[in-house]
């Protein structure tokens, strides 16, 4: 494994929830990253945010690691979940709640309900 792949693998396995994104959860630097970080932040999920703009090797490495061409990328309990469109759909359908429940990830269920209510 390359250094980037090793680093990604260790990060994904060491954290329950990881978001590879452009920017940080406090200051996303693209709309797609902002949307996913916004959902996680609003739902009160604790997660590691990895800014791919800070390291070109990680930026390309995460695409190779997941075999997924775009960023952001969300991982839960070491498993790749998806990018912005998939996370948006899962949030609105309630599938993200189920994924978090099944994996013991703490989140604000009322906030998740409010997101669906506002977009329903």
Image (cartoon, rainbow, N blue to C red):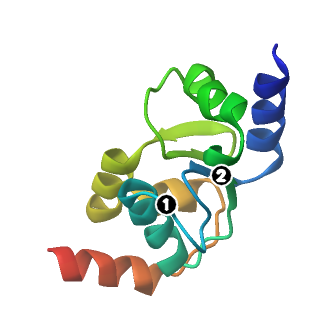
Q: On residue 29, which mark appears?
A: 1
Residue on which disc 2 sits: 51
Identified at 40% across, 76% down, the residue is 112
Quarter holding the N terminus? Answer: top right
Is residue 111 something that shows in the picture? yes
- Pick out the residue farthest to the left: 120
Q: Quadrant of residue 93?
A: bottom left
Q: How many marks?
A: 2
Q: Position of residue 8 (x, y in %)?
A: 75, 34
Q: Position of residue 88 (x, y in %)?
A: 32, 57
Horizontal side of residue 53 vs 89, given as left or right: right
Work out whether 118 lies above or below 104: below
User: Which sits earlier in the primary sequence, circle 2 or circle 1?
Assistant: 1
Observer-nearest of 27 and 100: 27
Q: CA distance from mark 2 to mark 1?
A: 9 Å
Provide the secondary structure element on which disc 1 rests.
loop
Identified at 31% across, 78% down, the residue is 115
Horizontal side of residue 88 vs 65, given as left or right: left
Work out whether 43 lies above or below 79: below
Provide the secondary structure element on which disc 2 rests.
strand
Are there few (<14), some (14-19), or many (20+) residues within 10 Å of tag 2? many
Identified at 43% across, 34% down, the residue is 70
Observer-nearest of 59 and 89: 59
- Pick out the residue farthest to the top: 1
Quarter holding the C terminus? Answer: bottom left
Observer-nearest of 84 and 57: 57
Is residue 76 something that shows in the picture? no
The answer to whether the residue labelled 2 contacts the one labelled 1, judged by CB atoms less than 8 Å apart, is yes
């Amino acid at each position: 494994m390359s250094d980037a792949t090793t680093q990604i693998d260790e990060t994904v396995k060491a954290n329950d929830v990881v978001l590879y994104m452009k920017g940080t959860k406090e200051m996303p630097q693209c709309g797609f990253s902002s949307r996913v970080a916004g959902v996680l932040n609003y739902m009160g999920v604790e997660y590691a945010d990895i800014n791919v703009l800070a390291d070109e090797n990680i930026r390309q490495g995460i695409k190779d690691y997941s075999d997924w061409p775009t960023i952001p990328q969300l991982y839960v309990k070491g498993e790749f979940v998806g990018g912005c469109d998939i996370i948006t759909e899962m949030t609105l359908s309630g599938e993200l709640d189920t994924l978090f429940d099944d994996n013991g990830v703490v989140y604000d269920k009322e906030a998740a309900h409010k997101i669906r209510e506002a977009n329903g």
